[in-house]
Image: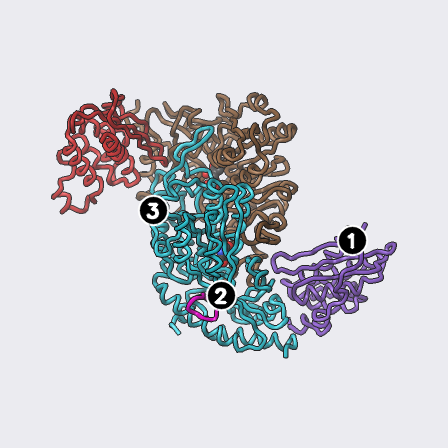
Chain colours: A purple, B red, C brown, D cyan
Amino acid sequence: MSLNELYREVILDHYRAPRHHQHVDSPDGTAEGKNPLCGDEVTIEVKLDGDVVAAVGAIGVGCSISQASASMMAEAVDGKSRRQIDELIRKFKVMMTIEESDEQVVNTERPGAALGDLEALQGVRKFPVRIKCADLPWITLEQALEAAE
Amino acid sequence: MSLNELYREVILDHYRAPRHHQHVDSPDGTAEGKNPLCGDEVTIEVKLDGDVVAAVGAIGVGCSISQASASMMAEAVDGKSRRQIDELIRKFKVMMTIEESDEQVVNTERPGAALGDLEALQGVRKFPVRIKCADLPWITLEQALEAAE
Amino acid sequence: MTDLADLRSDFPILDQKMNGHPLIYLDSASTSQKPNAVIDAIDDFYRTTNANVHRGAYGLSNDATDRYEAARARVAAFVNADAGEVAFNRGTTSALNQVAYGWGLYNLKPGDRVLLTLMEHHANIVPWQLVSRHTGAELVYVPHTGDYTLDLDAFTELLDDRVKVVGVTAMSNVLGTINPVRQIADAAHQIGALVVVDAAQAVPHVAVDVRAMDADFLAFSAHKMLGPTGIGVLYGKAELLETMEPAEGGGEMISDVQLDSSTWAAVPHKFEAGTPPIAEAIGLAAAVEYLERIGMDAVRNHEVEITGYALDRLGAIDALTIYGPTDTSNRGGAVSFTLADIHPHDLATILDQRGIAVRAGHHCARPLARSLNAPATARASFYIYNVRSDVDALVDGLQEAREIFGVA
Amino acid sequence: MTDLADLRSDFPILDQKMNGHPLIYLDSASTSQKPNAVIDAIDDFYRTTNANVHRGAYGLSNDATDRYEAARARVAAFVNADAGEVAFNRGTTSALNQVAYGWGLYNLKPGDRVLLTLMEHHANIVPWQLVSRHTGAELVYVPHTGDYTLDLDAFTELLDDRVKVVGVTAMSNVLGTINPVRQIADAAHQIGALVVVDAAQAVPHVAVDVRAMDADFLAFSAHKMLGPTGIGVLYGKAELLETMEPAEGGGEMISDVQLDSSTWAAVPHKFEAGTPPIAEAIGLAAAVEYLERIGMDAVRNHEVEITGYALDRLGAIDALTIYGPTDTSNRGGAVSFTLADIHPHDLATILDQRGIAVRAGHHCARPLARSLNAPATARASFYIYNVRSDVDALVDGLQEAREIFGVA
Ligand SMILES: Cc1ncc(COP(=O)(O)O)c(C=O)c1O
Ligand SMILES: Cc1ncc(COP(=O)(O)O)c(C=O)c1O
């Protein structure tokens, strides 16, 4: 387990300069996510245009992993349809849960494929304590989308 | 440790036919003793004539040791002065705490000497769990006498 | 007899002597002995994995947390509950107090009734008395019949709209009686009352299924089921745990703490204020694993057989009175008795001299003792490590007691 | 440095590796590691003496009771209390809840105030919040000064007739600050308020004397002082314990149980409902014995030295902020800090990779974290088994964090 795999440049960049780190005007759905044990917090706001995310805000405080994950996620879902987002969420979950050793599955699912910057979060998998940090914005996104329905 | 030393004939006799097992008319002092953990209970009532115990009641429920001790104690203190009773209490306490092996003290104090039937309780000493049973009526007597002052 | 005899070597304490005789331990209803598997699990945890849980951002703490949560999952599964429905605390007593203070204090009001059975342990009585002082609710008791089972007619009669909680022991620690918890729960639920089950005696000795029982809350202690002291379990239905207030407040059970008020963590952590009994949870999980390996059916069968044997042999002793059902199908392995006019405490001393451990007293069930008109009884109680010869030794000891006390 | 280095071999867990590196355990403020003496005492109890206490009329139970009560006497003497003033329970959190529910619930009323410090752990905040919901009392907080000590002027100002209870931590688990408990108690007593001392951090690390402090109640946990999980201690002045109500009800704490109400056993048993943490009490006594053998002065000296060294070395790191007094004479061994804009959780992960265990977060003191404007900090905390090279490793790890995060 190398720390370089965890703290990739792109993660530190998103941590230091989070994208979509602002409130959305009259959002259709909002959710607050909190990891009470480590203190990470993130608020996700979504505005929908039909079933497409027209605007997304990801505001929070917490560790580099949670905040970078939120920033990269916001970038990835902006402008996407519900179906595309569901696929993203699925891909992200697969990436975060697959054991590296489980080559078969890895090859089939090509973890990280099509996730763009988010692929940088692959390294988190090897740091089980931190997986919940990476997951937090995604769980919160699902809640925000639900709230928007 | 032989059970015969614990359950001497005189103890079983006092247990089966407790003396002074009745209330005293308008007692000067009354106390209830309770051993919440094993359930022994005893009520001691005393009527004084000057500083002499003119009547004593010892009513209770509990094991043979606690009830026989109460009965024998009542017999021993009936008609005695406070000074004599204090001496009895002292003697009884000595008897219940001396280690048998501690011959020196035993000889000096002649445990049980002048205690009459009460000497039968000597055997309890070897059964530490039961010492508090034998002690209960005596502690209660002290409280009843205090209440009478 | 179901052959569990070879288990005895798993319990190091059974090699001890008491008063010069090999220990014959007949007080498992009070606390059980521990197999090596449990003692070693605790030992190993402290030597290799000890750290606080849910707190650290480092490997050791993560391992400790994983083991702690795995223990929860295992214990929950043992009573057919979800892990989220099971909170660890100090013991049955503490768990029942949590229900009284967490649910009762917020929901009971003057005119409300708490319906208990007369055979409850103090642990399912006194918390309700304390909380009724604050709420004005009233306590009412269901009596038992002459054959030491719950008087279900009286229960039906007493179960009216005023009743908000029914507290019932799944298995009496004095009589051994197994109560029809499901039937009671169905009736209670019909009038909207909650059912709080004291399973301190049941979980160690019979397969318990919280869903089959339809219990709203259920409590048990590790130390009576081969596990360590210092830990117990509160089960609550998810929807109840989620809506009710925690009794104790502190660290680890909060979502946020403001100056005036706080919000709570998700269940079950909401009910685990402060550092939990971590090594104890690991030990309890080892106990559950041990019991599962034997199988609760085998445990129950063994106890039915040895209890049946004890009832037969004790029943044959003149002037011996057994307080409890004589039919092993609806009773557990706690056998309470008196012998002529010999005080139970004296019986215990005489047996103690032979290395036999039985309990004497009111067994923390004074209202029951009064209703039986037996302020004290002697109690022999059995577990997986007891064998027929233990019963034989007990009977021999009682014969000596008869001789000493000159009982004809 | 006081030479305690040879103690390290008493702690088997220190031989472990974490992420491939020898474990460097710097999270003792959260929970301490256990010496063999403690682990073995628990092990031995289960193997040789296990029985329930205060219950059995047989030798084994008598032995268990003797050992349990001897443990109480030893623990009481350790803080200069009488055995009758010390009750065992689950931990500091549980002990403080007992005070809030046992004393607060019966004695607080609308208009009354509970005066706490802003540096309290949630364990001395949330119980008062819960009880204030039932009593209508109000919570008020004493702030701290810029140098992380209690603002005594503010305290004096806030201490008026409405204050019925003052809750104060003897040593902050975040700042390390040692508070002037005696001075606070004197002032509080002058207006008739009670003082509830959270000594979870103090008792493990400095000699605590409840009489010298004049504390009315004082709570601490075994697991932070080399002892087992699952047990804590509530000290209360005899006259208070005797007159106040118990919070929890159940077996062993009663004198009599009638259907409607009960009477209580004598102190301290009144406060120990149900089967107590027996093996844990034995383990705690072994921990106390171990600490006494070293001597609390030597413990304190060692920690003053290593904390001083840590403050020096950490203080020399650019962009590192320490939250807490820098003078070792009025602080303990918990050192909280942040490093530039690196989140403490990330610091903890980076250190974890080097086998170094530190904690990151709000340390169960959110009101304090908010007042510091530091929602999360990293915390290194020291105990007798830590050595200078542990601090050196910490500093090296923090340098790596700087590199990874590109802190100039
Ligand atoms: C100052 C302080 N108070 C209270 C507690 C709570 O102790 P426990 O978790 O053992 O109940 C702690 C430890 O977490 C503490 O540091
Ligand atoms: C039926 C029953 N309920 C409750 C308890 C109390 O359990 P604990 O002492 O472990 O809290 C016991 C055991 O003493 C019991 O037998």
Q: Kindly check if marks 2 and 3 are in contact, taking CB atoms under 8 A apart as contact.
A: no
Chain identity of mark 1: A
Chain of residue at mark 3? D
Give how far apart the Cα atoms at labels 2 and 1 are. Answer: 42 Å
Looking at the picture, tell me which residue is in the foreground, D258 or D393: D258
Highlighted range, magenta: D324-333
Q: What amino acid type is highlighted by mark number 1?
A: Gly
Pointer 1: what residue?
Answer: A29
Q: Chain of mark 2?
A: D
Say which element carries label 2.
strand
- In the image, residue C358 lies at what x, y percent? 38, 36
Mark number for residue B108? Answer: none
- Are discs 1 and 3 located on one and the same chain? no
Question: Mark 3 packing: few (<14 Cα in 10 Å), some, or many (20+)?
Answer: some
Q: Tell me the CA gap for discs 1 and 3.
A: 63 Å
Residue B13 appearing in the image:
no
- Residue D188 screen position, x and y as percent: 42, 52
Q: Kindly tell me whether mark 1's CB lies below 8 Å from ligand 1.
A: no
Furthest-left residue in this view:
B108
- Residue that label 3 marks: D66
Residue B85 visible in the displayed image: yes
Relative side of D109 to A98, left or right: left
Where disc 3 sits, the SS reads: helix
Q: Residue at x 49, y 65 (%)?
A: D334
Provide the residue designation for mark 2: D334
The tag earlier along the polypeptide, 2 or 3, is 3
